Image (tube, rainbow, N blue to C red):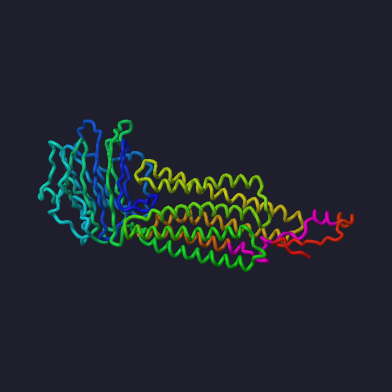
Amino acid sequence: MKNSAFGVVLTRCPDFQGEKRAEIPLNSFGFYANGSLEVDLSLLRLGLRETEEETPLVGFSLTRVQSGSIRSYSTPNPPNCPLRKNSSNLLVLFLINTKDLRVQVRRYGDQKKLFISPGLLPEVPSEPGPPKPELTVTPKVGSGTIAVLSKAQSKPTVSQGDQQGLSGKDSELVLGLGHLNNSYNFSFHVVIGSRAEEGQYSLNFHNCYNSEPGREQPFDLTVMIREKNPEGFLSAAEIPLFKLYLVMSACFLAAGIFWVSVLCRNTYKVFKIHWLMAALAFTKSISLLFHSINYYFINSQGHPIEGLAIMHYITHLLKGALLFITIALIGSGWAFVKYVLSDKEKKIFGIVIPLQVLANVAYIVIESREEGASDYRLWKEILFLVDLICCGTILFPVVWSIRHLQDASGTDGKVAVNLAKLKLFRHYYIMVICYVYFTRIIAILLQVAVPFQWQWLYQLLVEGSTLAFFVLTGYKFQPAGNNPYLQLPQEDEEDMQMEQIMTDSGFREGLSKVNKTASGRELL
């Protein structure tokens, strides 16, 4: 299933022009029983040279991905062509024979209920089950080229030379290949017939003629891919996301309302950063709400609501910027203990904020591209690294504040207050570390380790960790009188010296003394 800039789409039509890769990853989708995959190769134009290869070296592979494995997109040319050898894994090969105008379908492993048939499924939903043997496909033909399979030819036949699969009975059936204007076309569909065949499936296109470096030939490929589960058009791991995002949106909304009520009860000690924290909670809630509604329409109708998807990405961008700004401002002590940022802190903001905005925008742009694009995974890895750099950079203001409090605790005579602030900053430092670790590292490891139908736990861990971080940050820095973070020194040495000078010179006649408090408003 492909996440596009406007959500997950039902039907995709990747178009690759002038490709030279030996392998193109087209699709990855989690299927339940009675789920279906439809593939329509509408155009395949090969720049093949004369070869004596007897085995076709162009075709598709459908593989069930094992739990705990990581799919690679970055290898330009695999060392061994998957179309040349047999396999003991659950694997289906669609070998395109351009000489005989046919497609050989070879199945390896125990696939008793994995039904493969020519053509596409009818538009009207029908009861899932074994494909009817009389179904045939009449490929598109050009002048002088006729490639129509009879009913007898379309029935599965057993290949005597390839019987080394897991079950020892690899089956081979033949589909027709159309030829029109120097291009080839055919279509097929796959039905997951039982729970034994459920899993995460990957569909790849292979052109093993290009596996030799320096001898690549460009080719053109246009293919339509449509996938569906019994419960809707979402992959198995994405079906629970509608409810998950809706519940988490309600949690962030409740947290934001509670935080605003706290601020209204303690107006005397509220700073601008407190209202920024409230804006962050509400923005996060709205973003999750749009995301949830988007997934609902995708699952029920097969396509997203474009306006809602755009609103989700706008709020997602605002949430990302507000999150890092708030973390950095709290760590630097802005508005609480000082109103001016140092030059080093200004440089941090000048680096982190543009990078974070760029990372979020780039993620949206990358998600709008096809999964098989040559630089798809490379850019995702680069942007993930940029996000980690941003997360590490925002720790510097916290570290500088801790160091400043350590130095000040032994020099200015306010040991108790500074030690309390130092303890709070250390707690906040640990909180930020844990938040980054859980949402960027642990969550990815969890996604790799769990079975395909439980990969939604990745999003649950990310959103749950974010909510816990928001709640703990609000608790630590709430506008309370006994919060050491909000306790300003009662008197500075310079103020005492100035008071003595003004008293001795008579300048204090008729003036009242202002006592500094957490808000600086109490008049004695």
Identify the residue at image location x=21%, y=30%: 50
Say whether residue 399 is left or right of residue 437.
right
Identify the residue at image location x=20%, y=53%: 116
Q: Position of residue 205 (x, y in %)?
A: 28, 43
Give the vertical position of 434 relative to 61 (above or below).
below
Q: Position of residue 359 (x, y in %)?
A: 48, 47
Looking at the rendering, which quadrant does residue 233 occupy? bottom left
Is residue 110 in sight in this rendering? no
Q: Position of residue 375 (x, y in %)?
A: 39, 41
Q: Nearer the viewer, residue 359 or 430?
A: 359
Q: Nearer the viewer, residue 524 or 447?
A: 524
Is residue 165 located in the magenta-colored stretch of the structure?
Answer: no
Identify the residue at image location x=52%, y=62%: 468
Say whether residue 445 is left or right of residue 271.
left
Q: Nearer the viewer, residue 22 or 219?
A: 219
Say whether residue 460 is left or right of residue 38.
right
Q: Position of residue 268 (x, y in %)?
A: 67, 65
**Span highlighted in magenta in the image:** 474-499
Q: Nearer the viewer, residue 3 or 6?
A: 6
Say whether residue 255 is left or right of residue 104.
right
Is residue 37 in sight in this rendering? yes
Identify the residue at image location x=36%, y=42%: 373
Q: Quadrant of the C terminus?
A: bottom right
